[in-house]
Image (cartoon, rainbow, N blue to C red):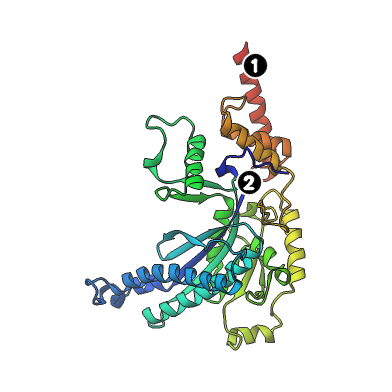
Amino acid sequence: MIELDQCPEFLKPRLRIFLSADIIGSTAQKQSKLGALEPNGQANDPSWFTTIQGFYFEAQQSVEQSWERLQKALGVGSYLGAAPTLWKTVGDEVLFTKVISDHRQVLAIVRCWIDALQAMREFLAREGKGRLGVKSTIWLAEFPIRNKEVVLSGDTFSQRGPIEDYFAENGRILNTYYLNGRKDINIDYVGPSIDTGFRLTTQASARKLIISVEVAYILAMAPRLANQVIVPVDLRYDGDVHLKGVMGGSGYPLFWIDLSTDDSAAVLSDRLLGQDKRDRDLVSDFCRAFFNENEDFISPPFIVSAEETVLTHYPDWYGERLDNLVKWFDSPSDGIASIEQAEAAADTSAGLGDPNFPENWKAFSERLSRLSAALDKNNDATKS
């Protein structure tokens, strides 16, 4: 069992959901003569700028309003927690995130997001005169082992001189962020799950809301997640796709949610071809098998919180690796020379390859053994 009593706030395990919405057709609008030169009557800005700025506003408003409707419908004391918050914007793309403390929140967030996407779609249809649309992707990421939080605000460092330990300094600032809710600290998220999520965005379309395999796994529990307010979503599957740099080159399962209306030609065509929604029990079985067969790169999602009662099983190696990080942060000079060694020590004892490396486990194990031997030799030379 993971002991959190002595764990620094920034090292406490968190499962985050990420939501991406990206404008379709904006590049063509910006590059066209009409889009580039047509004034919109507001400070002589080109029409495409107002569209993108408005998209940012509409995205935030629609998410907040949809979440408020869910909270009101479920009543006081619901399991929803706070609404997803804006992470950042990247060009024509807007991204939101939320910490998951109860697995039921995932279905609620997906339902909220689908409603918000409809509002974004209607806004873009008006502003783009039928030439613009929106595509979307949803994924999950575990912190702080497979993925990391990075402080972006340079003026908040606690020391003004040279920083000798970036991990410790990053941790101190993150602790301030989580404990005191400081608004002047900007956090970014990096790691293999984040990379996978952005790779998945390339598969999205106006019709296909792409979801990661972890999201599909939780949504497959829909009969246990749903209620009179939040109904299940149907899952679709397109087989494996190869995403650059993901899963060591192995195929990644492409699950999606259909955003088309039931009477659309695309949906009716799928029914004619027998390509309708997938059986949730089969999806769940497949996801578990996929996690088991690719454990060097991915694990079943788990949640460490007082509220969670279902997704409570974490990998065998996780507790020891987390413990090593905590020890290093508390006593960086106590037998471990660097954060890299702290992580490597846990990897060695757990028999796990570092998920931040794209190499397969065998190659990484051999490389780690050579590094360990070199460190031992260096330590012996230092002692003598």
Q: Residue at the top extreme?
A: 384
The reply to whether residue 141 is visible in this rendering is: yes
Q: Which type of secondary structure does the marked residue at label 1 adopt?
A: helix
Q: Residue at the front extreme?
A: 76
Query: Residue shown at 64%/16% (left/top)?
Result: 380
Q: Nearer the viewer, residue 369 or 2?
A: 2
Q: Which mark is residue 316?
A: none
The reply to whether residue 31 is visible in this rendering is: no
Question: Label 1: few (<14), some or many (≥20) within 10 Å?
Answer: few
| Residue that numbered label 1 is attached to | 380
Q: Nearer the viewer, residue 66 or 377?
A: 66
Query: Residue shown at 69%/84% (left/top)?
Result: 273
Q: Estimate the x, y position of residue 110 in percent, counting from the top left.
A: 59, 69
Q: Residue at the left extreme?
A: 44
Q: Quadrant of the C terminus?
A: top right
What amino acid does circle 1 point to? Asp
Query: Residue shown at 59%/64% (left/top)?
Result: 80
What amino acid does circle 2 point to? Pro
Q: Estimate the x, y position of residue 225 in percent, counting from the top left.
A: 69, 68
Q: Which mark is residue 355?
A: 2
| Vertical comparison of 56 with 183: above or below | below
First reached walking from the N terminus: tag 2 or tag 1: 2
